[in-house]
Amino acid sequence: MHSNYYCNQQCEYFPCHDNVDKEAFNCLFCYCPLYLKPICPGTSRYIIGAAGQHIRDCSSCSFPHIPANYDRIMAALMDSMELVTVRVSELYEAARALLVSYASLEQMGGEERKLQEQEADRVYQNRFAKEHLFFGLQSFDKSCVKDGYFQFGEERFPCQMLSRISPSSVQRGYFAVFHAPDWKSSYDASVLNEKQGKQKIELLTQYYIELWQNALLDAGRNWISMYLTRKEGVRAPVYVTDSFGPGFYGMPVTVLSKLAEMIPMERAGVCVTETGALLPQKSLVCLYLILSQPLPFSMQDCASCLGSKEGCVNCATYHRGNKQ
Ligand code: SF4
Ligand code: SF4
């Protein structure tokens, strides 16, 4: 017998699932260890109990009895990433306000603004309104926060942001990983309007797809900050920093590849390519710190960003690296 396989052919229920090869039926996980995980890789459904509660029904799932799934079950058991789902429609107000600002709609005249708003709203309704964002959140201990850098295992990640924060005020930290709904910007023939012309609509559609994605990423970042404030502040008030991370607010973008080895980004649908880029393209990997006292400065805009030696990938503070 191997430590990852055991077959109990004497069991009165053997094989308790008939869609798995009898000769390779694994009884090691007779009671599935993932049952209490909110999300599992199996095929569960839910039934309503007598008291109205949701009860997971695994009767049609043979996942734990397939030997090849052993590693996935062990990985899921060790996975401490919390997945939080939010409907895009819940972020609509915040994201639309951001989109209006990004597109400078308020500075446009009547007819032009009307055309732009119609296209922005059409793109939202057709492509984003029914989507969800999936946030992967993983906490880390305050001992990882040092003066000017993070220490994760053997790895040291410099971060200029930390030169402004006293490690003693940090209670905990979080990684957050998520991506915007991944709509490819393709031409939608149903909206061809002869007056406006096909090319203009294509470009405008593409423009607003990207703008909505950016707005949803930023609205999502703010939503996570509020979520962590509620979650961590149940017993006593806490202060949650705005997000910062690889490529922005003082951390080199080159740490992404190392982060990908440390946190299961794929659980949130994100990966890092061999060249160090995020996929999908509109993805974010960021950090938050839970503090016992508020920061004496705002992180909401680029004005207070320290940049980093490699610069910010997002904005004009690109080479503010040595500013203290
Ligand atoms: S998994 Fe458990 S119930 Fe199913 S056949 Fe094996 S020992 Fe019996
Ligand atoms: S038996 Fe299948 S559905 Fe049930 S918890 Fe395990 S993996 Fe998930």
Image: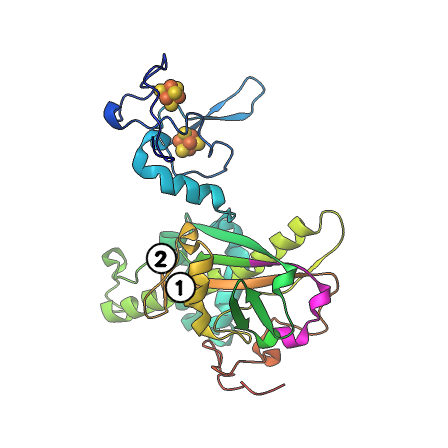
> Residue 83: horizontal and vertical position, in percent?
50, 47
The label number, if any, that marks residue 182 in the structure image: 2
**Quarter the N terminus occupies:** top left
Q: Is residue 113 above or below residue 131?
A: below
For the point 35% across and 32% down, which residue is it? 5
Check if residue 76 falls in the magenta segment. Answer: no
Residue at disc 1, secondary structure? loop
> Residue 145: horizontal and vertical position, in percent?
63, 66
User: How far apart are the two marked residues, 1 and 2, measured between alpha carbons?
Assistant: 7 Å
Q: Are marks 1 and 2 in contact (CB under 8 Å)?
A: yes
Assess disc 2: are there few (<14), some (14-19) or many (≥20) residues with their C-alpha within 10 Å of its C-alpha: some
Q: Earlier in the sequence, mark 1 or mark 2?
A: 2
Q: Which residues are magenta?
A: 162-174
The label number, if any, that marks residue 322 in the structure image: none
> Residue 14: horizontal and vertical position, in percent?
33, 17
The label number, if any, that marks residue 282 in the structure image: 1
Residue at disc 2, secondary structure? loop
Assess disc 1: are there few (<14), some (14-19) or many (≥20) residues with their C-alpha within 10 Å of its C-alpha: some
For the point 53% across and 62% down, which residue is it? 153
The amino acid at mark 2 is Asp
Check if residue 169 falls in the magenta segment. Answer: yes
Q: Is residue 58 above or below residue 105?
A: above
Q: Is residue 307 above or below residue 282?
A: below
- The foreground one among 122 and 57 is 57
**Quarter the C terminus occupies:** bottom right
The amino acid at mark 1 is Lys
